[in-house]
């Protein structure tokens, strides 16, 4: 792993006050968006109001089992569970934008695009990210 230096400590908001975003490494995107290609370091934005029936998995691996995702999108992208937590008041709200990367990419290659993604997170008022490694 590359050394990213020290990370400054930051006090977190309580969950009932927090706006949460989903970040999946399953290579997901909305139908019509460009699919992921081998060792892609970029991400796809998944709008919070997207129809989850239009979510496509283009993760490239012969060893990657898509069965669970095809049966229930929440296996790789738990947006319905997050919405339920918001309705119950466990979390404050669900972000307007969510993200997916394709896993198995060198972290150093992802750093420049993550900096871009952080701008979107800040603009959306996101306090925390639910990382779903697939």
Image: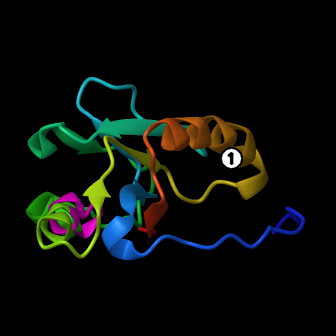
Q: How many marks?
A: 1
- Which residue corresponds to the image point at 12% horizontal and 65% vertical from the top-left? 87
Residue 28 painted magenta: no
- Which residue corresponds to the image point at 46% horizontal and 66% vertical from the top-left? 131
Image quarter (top left, top right, bottom left or bottom right) of the C terminus:
bottom left
Q: Report the predominant secondary structure element of the magenta stretch.
A: helix
Question: Looking at the rendering, which quadrant does residue 9 occupy?
Answer: bottom right
Q: Mark 1: few, some, or many residues within 10 Å (few <14, many ≥20)? A: some
Q: Position of residue 50 (x, y in %)?
A: 18, 37
Q: Position of residue 121 (x, y in %)?
A: 50, 43
- Which residue corresponds to the image point at 37% horizontal and 74% vertical from the top-left? 15
Q: Nearer the viewer, residue 107 or 40?
A: 107
Q: Nearer the viewer, residue 116 or 125?
A: 125
Where are the magenta residues, as a range? Answer: 75-82
- Relative placement, left or right, of 102 versus 75 is right
Q: Position of residue 94 (x, y in %)?
A: 28, 54
Q: Position of residue 92 (x, y in %)?
A: 29, 63
Q: Check disc 1 and report the residue beneath it.
A: 110
Position of residue 25 relative to residue 55, above or below, is below
Position of residue 49 relative to residue 132, above or below, is above
Image quarter (top left, top right, bottom left or bottom right) of the N terminus:
bottom right
- Which residue corresponds to the image point at 55% horizontal and 72% vertical from the top-left? 12
Q: Nearer the viewer, residue 3 or 123?
A: 123
Question: Looking at the rendering, which quadrant does residue 18 occupy?
Answer: bottom left
- Residue 41 visible to the viewer: no
């Amino acid at each position: 792993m590359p050394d990213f230096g020290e990370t400054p400590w930051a006090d977190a908001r309580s969950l009932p006050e927090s706006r949460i975003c989903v970040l999946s490494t399953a290579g997901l995107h909305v139908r019509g968006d460009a699919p992921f290609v081998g060792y892609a370091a970029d991400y796809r934005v998944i709008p919070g109001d997207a129809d989850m029936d239009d979510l496509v998995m283009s993760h490239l691996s012969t060893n990657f089992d898509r069965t669970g995702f095809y049966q229930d999108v929440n296996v790789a992208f738990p947006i319905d569970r997050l919405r339920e937590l918001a309705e119950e008041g466990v979390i404050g709200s669900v972000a307007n934008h969510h993200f997916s990367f394709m896993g198995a990419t060198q972290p150093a290659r992802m750093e420049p695009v993550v900096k871009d993604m952080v701008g979107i997170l800040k603009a959306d008022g996101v306090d925390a990210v639910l990382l779903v490694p697939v």
